[in-house]
Image (tube, rainbow, N blue to C red):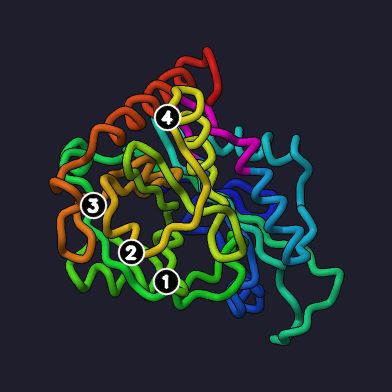
């Protein structure tokens, strides 16, 4: 990793330092965002910044920059990262206090950190094989719509899935499948694409919204509707989507094949539409 941004300065990653009294370090008191970059172009930046602003406002952290300021900072980070595709990570914590206290004073200065990492996207063999997932009880808190850095439950659930021989976990709450540990959930049944509606129990995914836009633009029937766990087990196709995962087919659920155990034809259509969208962005001719 090359240079990172920390509180007004670009510097080598190994030289970046944050106070041990920073509330992000002590409490996980902060917000983050991840933005893919294709050919030097930030992917759906407005939508990512909308979600960032919503999360900051919900937890009461003052936005350190306005929209133009964020765009300038991230554009400079991308320029310094050089050519190729990248994943930009942006984190804002409430800042450092003079002592550890659950209650925070109103005048703390937020800590702003950003870094860029190479992004290769899913490998061809992964796309051909698809993902294996386990259904697990959702043990997270009640405000999963906030993109908070407090991700211990997500870490535990992903690790449990990996130790069970799966790539990820689909989280189930009160009998309904919601999302994976860091991805939105879709299923296809009888030609209809379904994803759970936005709520406090799942993150409003930027890629999720794009998938719905692409489906509607191309005449694929789709709906936002709760997915009972029992319906997920009867699905013709299951997908996971995220900014870095893009659109991945799930081919095994709890050790059993999804349909014929291969990525399905509807997923193939969506994958092609998504790649065409990326190609337009790389060329600078059109945004998605």
Q: Is the residue under label 3 in contact with that under label 1 (CB below 8 Å)? A: no
Q: Residue at label 3? A: 131
Q: Is the residue under label 3 in contact with that under label 4 (CB below 8 Å)? A: no
Question: Circle 1 — which element?
Answer: loop
Is 99 located above or below residue 170 in the figure? below
Q: Residue at label 2? A: 230
Which of disc 3 and disc 1 is earlier in sequence? 3
**Mark 2 Cα within 10 Å, few/some/many (few <14, many 20+)?**
few
Cα distance, mark 4 to mark 1?
27 Å
User: Residue 201's x, y, as percent?
Assistant: 56, 65
What are the residue bounds of the magenta stretch? 36-48
Question: Circle 3 — which element?
Answer: strand
Q: Nearer the viewer, residue 130 or 78?
A: 130
Cα distance, mark 3 to mark 2?
19 Å
Cα distance, mark 4 to mark 3?
23 Å
**Left or right for 80, reference 268:** right
Residue at 78%, 43% (x, y): give it. Answer: 66
Cα distance, mark 4 to mark 2?
23 Å
Question: Circle 2 — which element?
Answer: helix
Which of disc 3 and disc 4 is earlier in sequence? 3
User: Residue 76's x, y, as percent?
Assistant: 60, 34
* Residue 58 magenta: no
Q: Is the residue under label 1 in contact with that under label 2 (CB below 8 Å)? A: yes
């Amino acid at each position: 990793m090359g240079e990172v941004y920390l509180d007004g300065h670009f510097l080598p990653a190994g030289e970046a330092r944050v106070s041990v009294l920073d509330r992000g370090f002590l409490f996980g008191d902060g917000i983050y965002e991840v933005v893919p970059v294709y050919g030097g172009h930030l992917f759906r930046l407005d939508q990512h910044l909308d979600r960032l602003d919503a999360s900051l406002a919900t937890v009461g952290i003052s936005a350190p920059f306005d929209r133009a300021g964020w765009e300038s900072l991230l554009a400079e980070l991308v320029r310094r990262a050089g050519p190729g595709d990248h994943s930009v990570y942006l984190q804002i914590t409430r800042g450092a206090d003079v002592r550890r206290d659950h209650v925070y004073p109103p005048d703390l200065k937020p800590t702003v950190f950003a870094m860029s990492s190479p992004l290769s996207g899913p490998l061809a063999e992964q796309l051909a094989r698809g993902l294996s997932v386990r259904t697990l009880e959702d043990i997270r808190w009640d405000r999963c719509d906030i993109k908070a850095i407090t991700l211990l439950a997500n870490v535990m659930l992903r690790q449990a899935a990996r130790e069970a021989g799966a790539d990820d976990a689909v989280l189930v709450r009160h009998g309904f499948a919601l999302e994976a540990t860091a991805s939105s959930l879709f299923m296809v049944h009888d030609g209809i694409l379904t994803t759970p509606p936005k709520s406090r129990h799942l993150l409003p995914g930027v890629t999720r919204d794009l998938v719905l836009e692409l489906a509607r633009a191309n005449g694929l029937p789709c709906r936002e509707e709760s997915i009972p766990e029992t319906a997920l087990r009867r699905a013709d196709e299951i997908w996971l989507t995220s900014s870095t995962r893009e659109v991945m087919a799930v081919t095994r659920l709890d050790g059993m094949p999804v349909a014929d155990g291969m990525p399905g034809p509807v997923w193939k259509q969506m994958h092609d539409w998504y790649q065409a969208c990326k190609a337009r962005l790389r060329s600078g001719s059109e945004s998605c």
